[in-house]
Image (tube, rainbow, N blue to C red):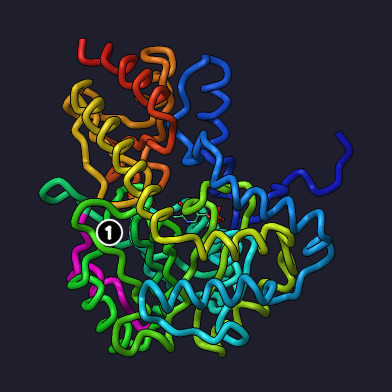
Amino acid sequence: MTSMSSSARPLLNRRLAEFGTTIFAEMSALAVRTGAINLGQGFPDTEGPEEIREAAVRALRDGRGNQYPPGPGVPELRAAVADHQRRRYGLSYDPDTEVLVTAGATEAIAAALLALLEPGDEVVALEPYYDSYAACIAMAGGTRVPVTLRPHEGAFRLDLDELRDAVTDRTRLLLLNTPHNPTGTVLTREELAAVAELAVERDLLVVTDEVYEHLVFDAAEHIPPASFPGMRERTVTIGSAGKTFSFTGWKVGWVTAAPALVTAVRSAKQYLTYVASGPFQYAVAEALALPESYFDAYRQDMRAKRDLLAAGLARAGFGVYRPAGTYFVTTDIRPLGESDGFAFCRSLPERAGVVAVPNAVFYDHREEGAPFVRFAFCKRPEVLEEAVRRLKTLAG
Ligand SMILES: *Cc1c(COP(=O)(O)O)cnc(C)c1O
């Protein structure tokens, strides 16, 4: 090996050293090697709506979006995003100054944190958290302050006192995610009202990841934090087409926020990807305007899949936290006589031919997440049925 750097100094910098490779790479490789059913990573195994795929083909053929689209996103998509927020939530945003299209929610999160944080700023985030949050806070030089969601009466709940205690004079920003991956928790109106009050009282910025906004089940309701008093001007709301339309490969996301916030986020975004996904932006504009029946059918379909997998997991002996939202179910492996989710997930493909993800990877307090394991249910019913059949062997 040629010596490109002094051997004493690792290549990966200190900010990122703790984020080696994601667990998804390891578990997906394990799935391939063992022929196991992969319920680890959350991507659907069915195609999104045909007419939206056709819209992308049309855009590509007609030469719309094949060259750099406008920095803030194509006007059609910005208008569709603004319209969606108004129709669903009564939130009105100016498509020209208050909407920004990004390369998926992932870039929106990165750009928001890189733009809004100074080194040393504290970010309060709900733990367990989506894996890019910790890495992006680190890249921005911020310090993450986790507030742990804890099991209570069948769901992972936010302790509002703990949240209040986590805020210090150095806190710049609250990073929220509802519906919440990996726990499936949907923050309630009362919880969000308290969070909003705290943000206003302590003058905090709020970044809220709502990529599962259309996947809420039963009595749960998705309410954007930006809709609470005093929140619109301090909140960066993040959405994405990936989860809602089953096009995770298209990487079309967006930000809605007050002009000054959008301008700040755009300052970082323009030096990350600059722009992305040209033709897909036109197609997603059409997707957001699909009739209500699309969103209803999608939700019903996913709810049936949740019920199928949750029931099967319970029969196999797992403790099951029935999710109110998202397409993940978090389980407790202690009823199976297990306590280490990492070891459990590494052995599960050999034991039962199924891949899952240990929730501990989403925690700073790894011990808090140790007995929990996440399964994705965004798969065809026959795949879920086969997974359930295989997992039954665990019940002994
Ligand atoms: C999948 C996911 C994302 C990433 O969304 P993209 O639009 O694919 O970048 C962001 N946040 C959460 C919570 C997710 O589950």
Give the number of callouts.
Answer: 1
Is-magenta flag for residue 166? yes
Q: Give amino acid for label 1.
A: Val
Residue drawn at x 25%, y 56% is: 149
Q: Report the side of 367 relative to 96 (left or right).
A: left
**Residue 350 percent coordinates (x, y):** 43, 13
Q: Report the side of 18 relative to 311 (left or right).
A: right
Per the rendered image, the range of residues in magenta is 157-169
Residue 159 appears in the figure: yes
Which residue is the site of mark 1? 186
Query: Quadrant location of residue 165?
Result: bottom left
Residue drawn at x 15%, y 46% is: 154
Residue drawn at x 59%, y 45% is: 50
Query: Quadrant location of residue 332?
Result: top left
Label 1 sits on a secondary structure element that is loop
**Residue 7 percent coordinates (x, y):** 76, 43
The image quadrant where one finds the N terminus is: top right
Callout 1 environment at 10 Å: few (<14), some (14 to 19), or many (20+)? Answer: many
Above or below, 330 against 54 in this view is above
